[in-house]
Image: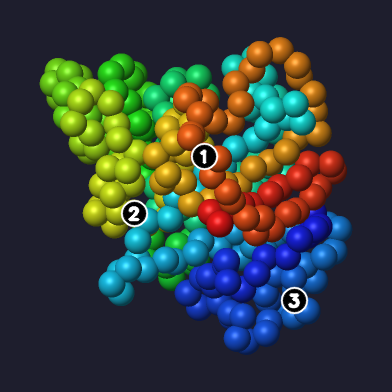
């Protein structure tokens, strides 16, 4: 993997205990302890440094930062045959795992949970020290966004997570399904007045639970709602060097926004023709 565009000091906060920009060492794009430009497989530590979460604050307190991680083909398809795996690659999965390891919580739509056979996050020894230093639990929680709560509560996502799975839903969600979710061990979080979820309230509710490093993996409908509501802070997009044609969904679906939202390029990596871009709100 090689870097095509450097991460700036302003857009990357160093993890606790790491050397920062003021030290002049280990900073992506700068000469230092690591040879960031070498065309080779990066270590997980290097990837974690390159994708370190910003730590925005308000009133001295950390506030939520929502990043999305998606993959797209050259012709804009977010999936093939209904799944993202066919357009992914090993390097994409390394980035996927790293982003998860940096997150407090992974927010995902119910349809994606069903389609992609989601499982609970697993503890990874490679990130244990980093998570402990950041005051995080051993693994991120999975937060499922669901209006209907029509979920299979016998799945490992609900029966055997290391930390309880969260379910974001509306106040008018079916009471029986809410009870079933709670009996299965899930924590139900109300983030909307009707049956659906308001993305603004969802982000705020997760922040109130202490989750400020937020990651969403879609699907396209959920990401579209986040874009439309203006809560998305960052997009990590893998561009797959493939063409699929057909009518597959884009990475974000739903109604268009009145004015296109402008994001700025933070970094760009490449491996075997795959581009790994990182954009933050301008």
Disc 2 + disc 1, Cβ < 8 Å: no
Indicate which label's residue lies in the foreground, 1 or 3. 1
Per the model, the C-alpha gap separating discs 2 and 1 is 29 Å
Q: Residue 125: tell me if it is visible.
A: no
Position of residue 117 in the picture relative to residue 162 (left or right): right
Mark nearest the camera among 2 and 1 is: 1
Q: In the image, what residue occupies the spot 28% across and 26% down?
A: 196
Q: Quadrant of the C terminus?
A: bottom right
Q: Does label 2 or label 3 sit earlier along the sequence? A: 3
For residue 5, side relative to residue 23 (left or right): right
Which structural element holds mark 1? loop
Q: Are marks 1 and 3 in contact (CB under 8 Å)?
A: no
Which of the 4 quarters of the picture holds residue 158?
top left
Residue 199 in the image, given as x and y percentages of width and height: 34, 38
Q: From what the image shows, is residue 106 above or below residue 125?
A: above
Q: If you read the primary sequence from the N terminus, does the residue marked by circle 1 or circle 3 appear first?
A: 3
CA–CA distance between discs 1 and 3?
A: 36 Å
User: Relative to 9, is 93 above or below?
Assistant: above
Residue drawn at point x = 20 percent, y = 26 percent: 194
Quadrant into which the N terminus falls: bottom right
Q: Kindly state the secondary structure of the residue where label 3 is placed.
A: loop
Q: Secondary structure at mark 2?
A: loop
Q: Which residue is mark 3?
A: 30
Which labelled disc corresponds to residue 21? none
Occupied quadrant, residue 212: bottom left
The residue closer to the viewer here, 146 or 93, is: 146
Q: Residues within 10 Å of mark 1 (few under 14, many from 20)?
A: few
Residue 267: x %, y % from top left: 69, 58
Marked residue nearer the N-terminal end (2 or 1): 2
Res 182 → quadrant: top left
Q: Which residue is mark 2?
A: 211
Instruction: Report which residue position mark 1 lands on.
Output: 259
């Amino acid at each position: 993997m090689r870097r095509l565009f450097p991460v700036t000091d302003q857009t990357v906060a160093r993890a606790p205990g790491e050397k920062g920009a003021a030290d002049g060492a280990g900073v992506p794009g700068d000469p230092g302890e690591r040879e960031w430009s070498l065309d080779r497989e990066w270590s997980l530590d290097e990837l974690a440094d390159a994708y370190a979460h910003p730590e925005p604050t308000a009133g001295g307190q950390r506030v939520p930062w929502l990043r999305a991680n998606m993959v797209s083909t050259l012709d804009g398809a977010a999936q093939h045959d209904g799944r993202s795996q066919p357009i992914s690659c090993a390097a994409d999965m390394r980035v996927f795992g790293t982003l998860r390891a940096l997150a407090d919580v992974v927010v995902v739509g119910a349809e994606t949970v069903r389609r992609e056979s989601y499982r609970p996050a697993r503890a990874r020894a490679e990130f244990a020290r980093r998570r402990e230093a950041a005051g995080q639990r051993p693994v991120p929680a999975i937060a499922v966004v669901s209006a209907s709560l029509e979920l299979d509560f016998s799945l490992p996502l609900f029966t055997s997570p290391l930390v309880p799975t969260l379910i974001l839903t509306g106040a008018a969600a079916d009471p029986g399904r809410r009870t079933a979710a709670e009996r299965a061990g899930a924590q139900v979080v109300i983030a909307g007045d009707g049956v659906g979820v308001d993305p603004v309230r969802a982000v705020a509710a997760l922040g109130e639970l202490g989750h400020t490093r937020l990651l969403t993996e879609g699907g396209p409908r959920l990401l579209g709602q986040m874009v439309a509501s203006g809560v998305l802070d960052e997009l990590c997009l893998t561009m797959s060097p493939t063409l699929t044609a057909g009518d597959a969904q884009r990475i974000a679906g739903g109604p268009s926004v009145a004015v296109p939202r402008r994001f700025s390029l933070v970094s760009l990596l490449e491996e075997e023709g795959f581009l790994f871009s990182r954009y933050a709100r301008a």
